[in-house]
């Protein structure tokens, strides 16, 4: 593994897992840094009842990077739909919670599960404790809780974390410093990506790292987060939170979204992100455009194999 180029991917949610499934097929040393700000659903319940970091995003990343029989992965991802206390829980979340209790440490639990699932790469939580994501809205009100922010009905001015004494893992800072390529996204801008970068020292380490930084922009806007955002709006939000321009390349989709898919997303007040290439270039970014989407039961996803191939191409250029 030490001879393979080192790739660090920062994010959370479905987008990160989708990308990892493609990238793990290439000869790269992957480290995924995953948000621990989730406070909804099964993760939120376990977080509150057991006082552990939320396991859901970590579980999805472990599954995406695993190299086991499909049935084992299906078992790990199984979500109970019966039982008063079990309903809504994922078996993988429960296993990670149990392993945390056994080992006494969330990071240790992830390492043990990585071995069990034969994970190709390394999975690191952005912090070894739960963090609370807060949003200051344009009207000055504060909304606390990752799951509540998109439903506030107000426009986000900025997000920030609490408590004040959050510490990243030293290992996380090391892998960022040693990376040959840093990938940010895809994923929800305010609730999946920024909760990682706002962990003290992680954002600074990313900004200072020698590696090229690639931002994979979302294909669709998200109501409650990025309503009517252009691609450059996404970038400016990241720069505003980090107080500096730190990305080198942005990967955007140039494929027209079919009308029937767009009409489905319109019901959620979501529409295709406008890729304002001239503005992106004026921000100093190299803009890479390609057909990088696929459709899964009318849900738009990044094409994992296509995006992974493009990223590996960037990596090869950097190393030659």
Image: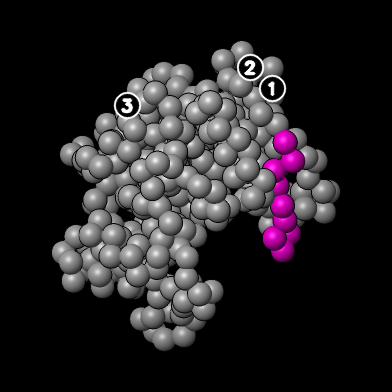
Q: Is residue 199 left or right of residue 117?
A: left
Comparing 230 with 30, the one in front is 30
Query: In the displayed image of the protein, which residue is found farthest to the right?
Result: 259
Does the magenta segment cover residue 76? Answer: no
- Lower position in the chain sequence, tag 1 or tag 3: 3
Residue identifier under label 1: 277
State the extent of the magenta-drawn residues as a range: 290-298
Q: Position of residue 273 (x, y in %)?
A: 67, 36
**Between marks 1 and 3, how big is the CA–CA gap?**
27 Å
Which type of secondary structure does the marked residue at label 1 adopt? helix
**Between marks 1 and 2, how big is the CA–CA gap?**
6 Å
How many neighbours does mark 3 have within 10 angstroms: few (below 14), some (14-19), or many (20 or more)? some
Callouts 1 and 2 close, C-beta under 8 Å? yes
Residue identifier under label 2: 281
Q: Is residue 243 left or right of residue 247?
A: left
**Residue visible at 43% across and 27% down in the picture:** 211
Asked if 251 appears above or below 261 in the picture, the reply is above
Which type of secondary structure does the marked residue at label 2 adopt? helix
Residue identifier under label 3: 204
Asked if 304 appears above or below 252 in the picture, the reply is below
How many neighbours does mark 2 have within 10 angstroms: few (below 14), some (14-19), or many (20 or more)? some
* Residue 59 seen in the current view: no
State which quadrant residue 232 falls in: top right
Comparing 235 with 181, the one in front is 181
- Lower position in the chain sequence, tag 3 or tag 2: 3
Asked if 240 appears above or below 260 in the picture, the reply is above
Q: Position of residue 48 (x, y in %)?
A: 27, 63
């Amino acid at each position: 593994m030490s001879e393979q180029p080192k790739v660090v991917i920062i994010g959370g949610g479905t987008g990160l897992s989708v990308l990892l499934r493609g990238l793990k097929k290439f000869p790269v040393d992957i480290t995924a840094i995953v948000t621990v700000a989730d406070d909804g659903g099964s993760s939120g319940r376990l977080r509150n009842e057991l006082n552990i970091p939320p396991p859901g995003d970590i579980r999805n990343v472990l599954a995406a990077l695993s190299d086991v029989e499909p049935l084992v992965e299906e078992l790990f991802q199984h979500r109970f739909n019966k039982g008063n206390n079990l309903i809504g829980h994922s078996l993988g979340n429960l296993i990670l919670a149990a392993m945390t209790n056994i080992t006494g440490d969330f990071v240790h639990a992830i390492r043990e599960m990585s071995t069990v699932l034969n994970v190709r790469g390394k999975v690191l939580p952005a912090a070894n404790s739960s963090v609370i994501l807060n949003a200051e809205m344009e009207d000055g009100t504060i909304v606390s809780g990752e799951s509540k922010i998109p439903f506030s009905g107000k426009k986000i001015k900025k997000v920030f974390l609490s408590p004040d004494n959050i510490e990243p893992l030293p290992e996380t800072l090391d892998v960022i410093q040693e990376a040959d390529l840093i990938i940010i996204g895809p994923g929800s801008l305010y609730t999946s990506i920024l909760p990682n970068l706002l962990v003290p020292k992680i954002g600074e380490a990313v900004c200072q790292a020698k590696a090229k930084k690639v931002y994979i922009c979302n294909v669709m806007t998200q109501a409650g987060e990025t309503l009517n955002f252009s691609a450059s709006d996404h970038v400016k939000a990241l720069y505003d939170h980090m107080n500096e321009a730190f990305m080198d390349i942005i990967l955007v989709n140039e494929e027209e979204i079919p009308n029937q898919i767009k009409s489905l997303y319109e019901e959620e007040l979501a529409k295709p992100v406008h890729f304002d290439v001239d503005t992106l270039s004026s921000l100093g970014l190299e803009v890479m455009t390609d057909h990088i989407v696929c459709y899964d039961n009318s849900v738009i996803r990044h094409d994992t194999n296509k995006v992974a191939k493009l990223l590996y191409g960037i990596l090869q250029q950097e190393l030659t």
